[in-house]
Amino acid sequence: MITCIKKIFTQLSSYVLALALVITILPPNEALAASDAIINLSSEYQTIRGFGGMNHPAWAGDLTSVQRETAFGNGDNQLGFSILRIHVDENKNNWARELETAKAAVAKGAIVFASPWNPPSDMIETFTRNGVANQKRLKYDKYAAYAQHLNDFVTYMKNNNVNLYAISVQNEPDYAHDWTWWTPQEMLNFMKNYAGSINCRVIAPESFQYLKNMSDPILNDSQALANMDILGAHFYGTSISNMSYPLFKQKGAGKDLWMTEVYVPNSDNNSADRWPEAIEVSYNMHNALENGFQSYVWWYIRRQYGPMKEDGTISKRGYCMAQYSKFVRPGYVKVAATSNPNTNVYVSAYKGDNKAVIVAINKGSSAINQNFVINNGSIKSVDRYRTSANENLAKTANIDTSNSSFWANLPANSVSTFVCTLGSSSPIEPTPTPSPTPTPTPTPTPTDTTVKDYAVLKDGWYYIKNTNAQKYLQVKDNTGANGQNVEIGTGTGVNGQKWYLTNMSNGYVTFKNGLDYMLDVANGANVDGTNIQIYSVNGMDAQKFKLVPTGTSNVYGILTKSSVDTKSLDVYNFGTADGSNVCEWTYYKNSCQMWVLEPCSAPESTTPTPTPETPSIPASMNIKIISDWSEGATAEITITNNTGKDLSGWTCTFTTSRPISALWNAQLVNSNGNTYTISNPSWQPLLTAGSSYTFGCTMGSGSSDVTITNVSLK
């Protein structure tokens, strides 16, 4: 990870910092007064997922049990990390190395995600890149196998009581002198055509310098974007001006933005305690959070330049991270704050658990008396924690407050965190909920969470209006396409705002919009924050919902069957603006989860022009079992067009001896028992004579000798 170009980036930043220090060394002054820092608790931004670092036993040795407590505990002399990043080794025999620290992190409530540096050796080929021989890349015919390799790691960790929160496609694909290169188009190909088969949230592309040419193609492709859950980036040499990403703001609704690796300002030997150099860590975190990032993950947790020194004690850099990680907890929401109220003073603010947390950095050589004003909330008390030249997260004397404001002295070269307990008069609505905490061990006997007290409405066309925003459920840009986002907007009566309710069995309903697509939970996931989209009809649980009464006439919660009735449609972060995203979230009967169904007229041109039936033509079909376990299997099914004709916009019907529970790289048209009809994905409409096409699926339990019969192609 520490190679020549990164050294140049970090050394340059060190020289700039040293020059700044020379310029600003002035005689001490009395504390200066500053402009007010205004905190607006009603103006919400991103939800924070957490802070953490990397454990890499193969390269840096595993953390000890005591060091795990220091990293992931949140008591005295502990960092309060809530994210652990681990390595996906190319050799499965080495996977066990990751378990002990991962289990310890999960036990402390942290989430775990994983990044690979290389695929297995049999999937790699060498090539000459920019005149340099023997560079590595993934073989083009191994993309599906590589997706399965990542799935196997997810399964291995799950079987060892670590439910991964997410998995990355590749660590630093654009800086791979010592690992595997990916071009932007290769990354797009994988994200579009293969990432959908991964049974976990997917992180991409983890560019080493947050270079947008690696992620622009993903954001500009609807299928690749649908398959990406988290846009991950590294910050090596990334300037503040390059931390913003307008295209992500435009197209990344419902997706997370994570900073997944960095060390700043350098990796010099024994540099972790240098002061005031360590303040650069807090400043880098401030700028990441100001630009929409939801997570901040350091490189090695334990290193001579890291948050924990080699002897297991917390460094100055670690204390600067802890000013955020111990107090800004997962699920807290960033709120508006005056970012730079005075020269060299930087402020950000967050809310959660009936608290407002303010982090203030003074990078200057003079103390500052700073006034903090809380809008849309009142303060009962304020606790301050500070790191300076002579303090390490020191809890200082209580601060006097005046209803909604307080003054505080910010010493020169210091980082202060103010934890404000809010008064009962605060009008803050509750945040949706903290990020889900992985459960170390599955419950042996599942609890029946299905809702029995549901509402029944007549089949027909409806507008669906959110009671909090007073805006309507709609398809983004009124455009029908698989994976197209669902959001709220001002009522206009377009087809994308009209939904046909159909009653199913056991109280469930489906919603088909006027664009002829179904309301759909992305990937059928049962995870808070899962995006709501539209998709072709497939009969899966992801497209089934249940209306539950709220006590107010014609106002309902809309529960998702994929969550076993525990989660509902939710306007993210109580959004009220046009374009606010709709996701799945644990049902708390919040106003952002309440919906009115208003009967409406049928959309225009809802009946498609009949298309003459094409006779079914026999085709050959082969199945390859990739992985088989007691409860299911993953497989690849290959269709061969032996009709002698090119087929455009093809469909295939077949019967299997084992049920299919999910599929990718094809669209499910309908199913009846173990008989399925699929159609081509949008990127593969043509199946030429004699050619073959392979799609993937997961299957239920049954014999390993799977048979496919009654195959027809048209």
Image (cartoon, helix red, strand yellow):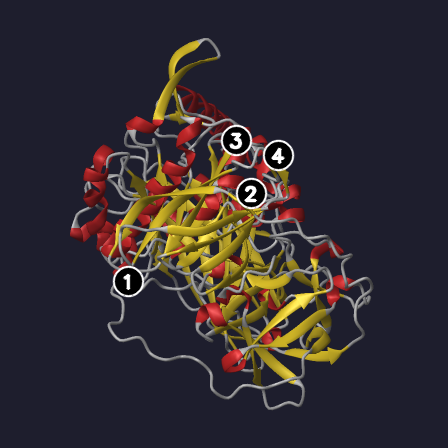
Camera-side residue: 571 or 616? 616
Q: Give the residue type at disc 2.
A: Ala
Q: Residue at x 52, y 79 (%)?
A: 505
Q: Residue at x 63, y 75 (%)?
A: 502
Residue 662 at x, y percent in the picture: 44, 56
Using the image, determine if residue 82 lies above or below residue 382. above
Q: Give the residue type at disc 4.
A: Asp
**Distance CA(mark 3)–CA(mark 2):** 28 Å
Q: Residue furthest top?
A: 131
**Distance CA(mark 4)–CA(mark 1):** 67 Å
Residue 690 is labelled as 3
In what element is the residue under mark 4?
A: loop
Please say whether residue 388 is visible from this viewpoint. no
Residue 646 is labelled as 4
Of badges 4 and 1, nearer the viewer stands 4
Figure quadrant of the N terminus: top left
In what element is the residue under mark 3?
A: loop
Residue 149 at x, y percent in the picture: 33, 40
In what element is the residue under mark 1?
A: loop
Please say whether residue 544 is visible from this viewpoint. yes
User: What residue is shown with label 1?
Assistant: 75
Residue 224 is labelled as 2
**Distance CA(mark 3)–CA(mark 1):** 66 Å
N-term-proximal mark, 4 vs 3: 4
Whether residues under marks 1 and 2 lie with C-beta atoms below 8 angstroms apart, the answer is no
Camera-side residue: 368 or 28? 368
Quadrant for residue 574, please give it.
Answer: bottom right
**Distance CA(mark 4)–CA(mark 3):** 8 Å
Q: Give the residue type at disc 3.
A: Gly
Of badges 2 and 4, nearer the viewer stands 4
